[in-house]
Image (spheres, helix red, strand yellow):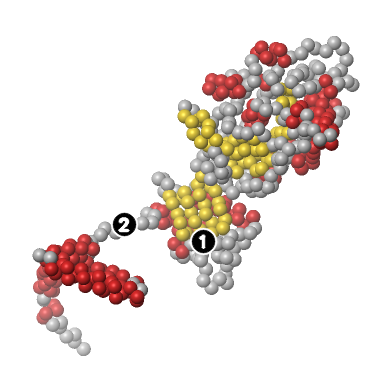
């Protein structure tokens, strides 16, 4: 069959049709430009009428009659005013033009890169927040992240700084392992090198992730505004505690949130355990505690490492002894045990007689033991008792006798700590880079933040008793006799040391004539050397 030719209008009139379409489009654009004010006013009148209807619908029925009367009165008054109707018409047209104007839409939400990052986070969470038999899953491959990410924020580099996730109710958020998997995933996908804080709302099935600012390291050792029995371990986040203290930060003074550890007869955590890696700042924290304890009490320092980190405290007022050798350490701890018993007996006799406790039993006594594991190895090799055995009496009865024990050691020596030390040191501090498992083994609870790989000295976590795990930054308290110490930090520590060189020379007594010195000879206010504390064989 032969093909029939196309009609003439379709075969040869395509050019005219194109010109007609262009003419019609130009005419419509010109008409739109000419009628744009009328279109704007009409749109505004429609919006004003809609707003009036909504207002009338929201008006209670008992108030509609007075409203109508008020409107009629206003119209009547406008009609009586010269040029009133014209002015009213101009006002209505102006309001309609303003209401109907074209507004540039404000762009909200993340940009293209941010949406791609949120979609990647959504896809990564699908295997953890979805099950096969869920009829309407919140998380599904290729799904919409806007239904689950109800809040988000980005920094200048386009990385996520805050994320609020709504997860299904069947997710096992009560299990620590399940929460840890989600936190590790979000940490890896949002960018490493930063510290993230996670808050789980198990009742509302929501998880909030925030990027924490690094804690300042510029606060040095100084006199903190505290009451007797309070010790500032360091500083934490602003919203973690309900208290601030004024501190000198460089050339200015500001308020900082401290982590305050309370000791004494009413303390629930009378003793402290500090654990960290080499170079993490455990000795710095011990030195900071010693300087604060000297304001109201006496201290005994036993250094197991033997590096002379506490040489600046030797012979100072209130420093009863600074021991590095095994013999002196054993004698000092034996005296501390007898002193604790003496205080308990004296306080008990005073209460039975109806008198207040003696003054010497109310003055705090601090026992600072650094690296007891080293002394334990030396004692085992020499056939002597472990120094930790002599801490049983101060640890068990120290709260009633105003005796406080602070112990510090490293992670590789935790298994050498005695059961008494582990049981009675309810205040715990972990310093330096550590895994979540290591932190949990010391504090008894995982932190709600992700530890960073690079931690400055004195950076870690603290938990007082059964309280929450808080971030901690220890004030800079270096050894003033160390050549690597800056002049500003050296002067800050020296100003806190009680007494000068004359006081040091006056505090050191003459050597004993002969024979060993009994442990009872160590009395508060007298600093003794290692030779005077030598035990008899």
Q: Is residue 131 above or below residue 509?
A: below
Screen quadrant of the N terminus: bottom left
Nearer to me, 341 or 180: 341
Q: Residue 83, located in which quarter of the rendered image?
A: bottom left
Q: Which mark is residue 106?
A: 2
Q: Position of residue 75 (x, y in %)?
A: 18, 70
Q: Is residue 222 visible?
A: yes
Nearer to me, 261 or 113: 261
Q: Is residue 42 visible?
A: no
Task: Name the N-terminal-most of marks 1 and 2.
Answer: 2
User: What residue occupies the far front of the structure in this picture?
Assistant: 354
Query: Mark 1 Cα within 10 Å, few/some/many (few <14, many 20+)?
Result: many
Q: Which mark is residue 166?
A: 1
Q: Secondary structure at mark 2?
A: loop
User: What residue occupies the far right of the structure in this picture?
Assistant: 537
Direction from residue 326 to residue 176 in the image, left or right: left
């Amino acid at each position: 069959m032969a093909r029939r030719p196309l009609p003439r209008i379709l075969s040869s009139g395509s050019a005219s049709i194109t010109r007609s379409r262009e003419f019609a489009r130009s005419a419509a654009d010109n008409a739109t430009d000419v009628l744009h004010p009328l279109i704007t006013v009409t749109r505004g009148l429609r919006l004003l009428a809609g707003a009036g209807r909504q207002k009338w619908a929201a008006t209670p029925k008992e108030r509609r009659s007075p409203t109508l009367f008020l409107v009629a009165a206003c119209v009547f008054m406008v009609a009586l005013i010269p040029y009133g109707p014209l002015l009213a018409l101009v006002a209505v047209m102006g309001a309609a033009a303003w209401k109907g104007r074209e507004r540039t839409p404000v762009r909200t939400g993340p940009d293209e890169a941010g949406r791609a990052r949120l979609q990647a986070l959504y896809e990564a969470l699908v295997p953890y927040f979805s099950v096969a038999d869920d009829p309407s899953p919140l998380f599904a491959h290729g799904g919409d992240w806007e239904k689950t990410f109800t809040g988000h924020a980005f920094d200048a580099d386009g990385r996520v700084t805050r994320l609020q996730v709504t997860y299904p109710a069947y997710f096992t958020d009560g299990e620590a392992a399940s929460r840890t998997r989600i936190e590790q995933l979000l940490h890896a996908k949002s960018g490493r090198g930063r510290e993230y804080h996670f808050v789980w709302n198990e009742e509302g099935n929501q998880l909030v992730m925030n990027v924490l600012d690094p804690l300042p390291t510029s606060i040095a050792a100084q006199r903190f505004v505290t009451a007797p029995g309070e010790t500032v371990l360091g500083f934490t986040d602003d919203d973690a505690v309900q208290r601030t203290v004024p501190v000198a930060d460089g050339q200015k003074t500001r308020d900082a949130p401290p982590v305050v550890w309370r000791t004494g007869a009413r303390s629930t955590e009378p003793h402290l355990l500090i654990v960290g890696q080499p170079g993490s700042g455990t000795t710095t924290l011990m030195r900071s505690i010693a300087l604060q304890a000297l304001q109201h009490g006496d201290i005994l320092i036993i250094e197991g490492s033997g590096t002379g980190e506490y040489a600046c405290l030797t012979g100072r007022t209130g420093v009863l002894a600074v021991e590095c050798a095994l013999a002196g350490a054993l004698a000092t701890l034996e005296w501390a045990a007898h002193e604790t018993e003496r205080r308990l007996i004296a306080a008990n006799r005073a209460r039975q007689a109806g008198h207040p406790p003696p003054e010497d039993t109310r003055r705090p006594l601090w026992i600072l033991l650094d690296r007891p594991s080293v002394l334990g190895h030396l004692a085992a090799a020499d056939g002597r008792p472990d120094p930790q055995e002599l801490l049983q009496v101060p640890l068990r009865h120290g709260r009633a006798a105003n005796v406080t024990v602070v112990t510090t050691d490293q992670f590789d020596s935790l298994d050498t700590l005695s059961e008494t030390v582990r049981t009675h040191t309810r205040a715990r501090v972990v310093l330096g880079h550590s895994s979540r498992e290591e932190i949990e083994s010391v504090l008894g609870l995982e932190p709600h933040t992700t530890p960073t790989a690079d931690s400055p000295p004195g950076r870690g976590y603290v938990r007082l008793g059964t309280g929450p795990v808080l971030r901690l930054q220890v004030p800079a308290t270096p050894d003033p006799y160390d050549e690597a110490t800056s002049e500003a930090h050296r002067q800050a520590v020296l100003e806190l040391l009680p007494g000068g060189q004359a006081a040091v020379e006056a505090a050191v007594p003459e050597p004993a004539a002969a024979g060993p010195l009994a442990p009872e000879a160590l009395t508060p206010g007298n600093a003794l050397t290692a030779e005077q504390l030598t035990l008899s064989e």
